[in-house]
Amino acid sequence: MAFDRNKRLLLSAGAAGVLAAILSSCSTTPTAPRGPVTPPGIGSAVPHPEPPHYTGEQPPPAPREFRAAWVSTVANIDWPSRSNLPPAKQQAEAIAILDRAKAMNMNAIVLQVRPAADAIYPSKLEPWSEYLTGKQGKEPVPAWDPLQFWIAQAHARGMELHAWFNPYRARMTGARTPLAKEHIANTNPQVVKSYGKYLWMDPGEESASAHTLGVILDVVRRYDIDGVHIDDYFYPYPIEAPTATGGETAALDAPAWQKPEVEFPDQPSWQRYVQGGGTLDRAAWRRQNVDKLIEQIYLGIHREKSWVKFGISPFGIGRPDRRPKGIAGFSQYDKLYADAELWLQKGWLDYLAPQLYWPIAQTPQAYPVLLDYWLAQNTRGRHVWPGLFTSRTADGSGKSFTNDEIVQQVDVTRSRPAAQGHIHFSMVALMQNRGGLADRLKADSYQSAALVPASPWLGEQVPAAPTVSLRRVDKGTCVDFVMPAGAVTAAVWARYGNEWRFTATPAARGKLVLADLGGESVRDVVVTAVDRVGNESLRVQAKL
């Protein structure tokens, strides 16, 4: 699709002022730092970020925790607030989301860039999304690149940006505008099936999977994203057969598990498989189709860029033959043909974010039991960062959560050393501060910054140490630093009196102003360089 880069740059020029405002005014000229200091506790468990402050001659290892939120574009759940807003308004809403996340000491956003075989960025493979411009295929006016904007703004705040793709959905039930001519339902109609009120790409059609893979790798090549993320929609959630009630049934509705279901219409691809000598039964064949795409995505991403993480957020209940005693509910293994346990055990992902959307005390789907289940499946030592149903907080429904529920789920997760992070669904609840939850998380759970946990299987080379110096500025201390090549983050411990406080800032800034606290200035700092996969350099200590 044609895209006017000059228009985009003109439109985005206003962002420069935002970036400048969050940079300090101190000089970036370094002076000779004191020698590297070996960090204590190398090789030991890295702590979760509580308590937020420490005393002693040396601070502990930097706190590590993945703190993220999903930002849904589908149906305008999170962003933009409605379709066809002027681009300047869309940018302002994006900045408000990122500012809120940063103020809460979160460190990542999972942004939905492909809601339904469409795009919120300029693409030659798929049309612009109606959720962005109001009509599928309609280019923003004036032209701009929303994904590039999100990436730049996230990175300017020291946050990761993960691009979230729906792998097979081709049209949502509530879509309002006609399909664009370049949509896959028009360019390759034989691979797109009607299922209830949805359009769905058949995972059994190799060209459909190849298209999805191509879309994902195109983004990996063209954009400086930190992760690729796919959700729980593989084969579609089953809908109730018309003979039952005449309507669709949500998969989480327990009585629907035993009701007649509409068969997914993949007979042509299934027959080709059988006639070609295939020996799997239909359910196993469907799982194999999904497995192939998962493996191809993982390998393809890392062939392009070794540091880009691949994450999957499957439905939160495991396969029936492995579930803990007392756990009951929908089977993604049998209904969505998603063998998430296999993907973990094959190492075809860098993080799993199982959607654990039930309260701690709900015995058939108890949050702690399900979390322990997924941790037990993680034989390759990948990240397990559960998804929390944050939007259920004070939502006015009969199943509404109090803010205690989410805070306690964060605490439960932290009590498991193998689970160093979580993702909130979704950002709208934190923007609205439902039930005071955003305030509570900031005050009780996210009192200080945290680094994203390292992914050593993606690379273990430790960055060189930075050079660091300190000097006084008005009502604060300026930390000047020069980071080595490959570093993206400066991790900084600052000591006020006998107390150490932690923060992190983008490496590209070259400086950080630490304000005086209660009239007390920083005594000294300890700084490390952190690379794209979380490897941390030796420490450099500097004093005034």
Image (cartoon, helix red, strand yellow):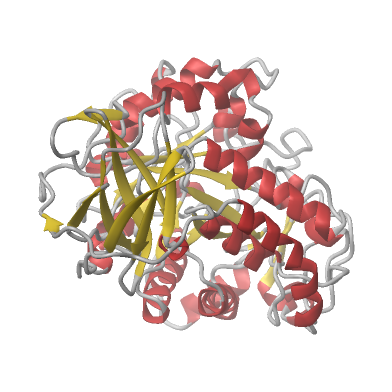
**For residue 58, above or below residue 234:** above
Residue 10 occupies quadrant: bottom right
Q: Residue at x 51, y 71 (%)?
A: 224
In this rendering, position of residue 195 left or right of residue 337: right
In this rendering, position of residue 399 left or right of residue 8: left
Viewer-side residue, 99 vs 188: 99
Q: Position of residue 93 (x, y in %)?
A: 74, 47
**For residue 426, above or below residue 490:** above
Q: Position of residue 254 (x, y in %)?
A: 56, 27
Residue 167 occupies quadrant: bottom right
Viewer-side residue, 263 vs 428: 428
Q: Residue at x 88, y 69 (%)?
A: 141
Regarding residue 201, the answer to whether it shows in the image is no
Q: Position of residue 437 (x, y in %)?
A: 56, 23
Q: Quadrant for the N terminus, please.
A: bottom right
**For residue 533, above or below residue 367:** below
